[in-house]
Image (tube, rainbow, N blue to C red):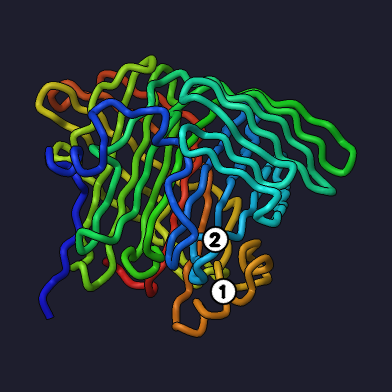
Amino acid sequence: MAKKIARLAALPEDYKRLGLSKEPALWEDGHRTKAKFGSYEWWYFDGKMDDGSSLVIVYYTQPVTAIAPSYAPSVTFSLTKDGKHIQDSVTAKIRDCAFDRAKCNVKVGNSFCRGDLKNYELHYESDRVQADVTLKASANSWRPETGHFLFDEKKLFAWFPSVPEGKMEATVTIDGETMTFTGTGYHDHNWGNTGMFWIMHHWYWGRAKIGDYQVISSYITAHKPYGHEHFPIFLISKNGEKLGDNPKYLTYSQSDPEFDPVTEKHYHKKLVYDYNDGVQHYRITYSAEKIIETFVVADSKTSVQAKSNPLQLWLVKKAGLAPSYIRMVGTVTLEKFEGEACVEKQESPGLWEQMYFGLDEDV
């Protein structure tokens, strides 16, 4: 069987067909999908707080494993503080939701997120948890070329890092106890028209603020029919100004495999992104220290989405699929080289993830 084609849309005709320019636009953070078979969409926000806490809030039109051609809006909340992990979620009827195509303006029941690529306001509300969050961008919006990954030209996964890094402030009340946080935040917007488990095998994604530097990194591996095509993605900025993002100068490696008994998948505790364009040379190393969240998407015991969409997740499991997720924290190390000499080295806490759709295998 001939290998199917998977590619990052980066040709001039791709930009024209998608209505995009090199500079990201406000509407790209707006609602991009319709309630069709296989489509999905989410707006993701995370914060790495000054006290070491991690906060993640995600707004969904429907689950990442959506099969039915309809919306099932939800919001997930995750806070890790002082070694404790609090996870919560809300769902809402479509009549109580709204999605703006012109910009990020999402309403799911009483929860919402809205912003303009520079400033964002978030509210999360359930019976147990209330959170109000602001995010002010310190780096310009960015995407790898068009941000559209094409499979057989018609199937797509789109990724738009709307806020690569910014200042985040949050007030969170859980079971009547109110906490305030400040730290560094991030926001991206993702959507697609085909279930990811049909086109992707797995990915690693991470971001970090290390001193004056900001880093976004990802390594996507397509499914077997696409020859396990690899997509290395990398952005390094300093004080919000881009230093480099061309994947042809990037070398990726992973090591220290570890088996996670919850997902029954291996993950790598060490990821290295080495960016060397002949003029500047940076090496970013992610060293995992702790898993803060892990679940099997089709398992109602570990997955919020399985609880809220049992029929869809039952179909996923029936098809022999076992999508899983691991979110981890640890140390991100930046090294700057001149020739063979390391002339600068800094470290910072970081947050990253592994999303694994395929079988547990080394590809």
In the image, is residue 302 above or below residue 110?
below
Kindly report the distance in space between the C-alpha atoms of the residues bearing marks 2 and 1.
9 Å
Residue 266 shows in this picture = no
Pointer 2 or 1: first along the chain: 2
In the image, which disc is placed on residue 102? none
Can you identify the residue that label 2 sits on?
63
In the picture provided, is 54 more to the left or to the right than 316? Answer: right
Q: What amino acid is at disc 2?
A: Pro
- Counting every numbered tag in the picture gives 2
In the picture provided, is 356 more to the left or to the right than 226? Answer: right
Find residue 281 and report its horizontal and vertical position in percent: 19, 27
Which residue shows up at 13% across the image and 40% down it?
Answer: 248
Can you identify the residue that label 1 sits on?
313
Q: Residues within 10 Å of mark 2 (few under 14, many from 20)?
A: many
Residue 158 shows in this picture = yes
Which residue shows up at 48% across the image and 74% down it?
Answer: 322
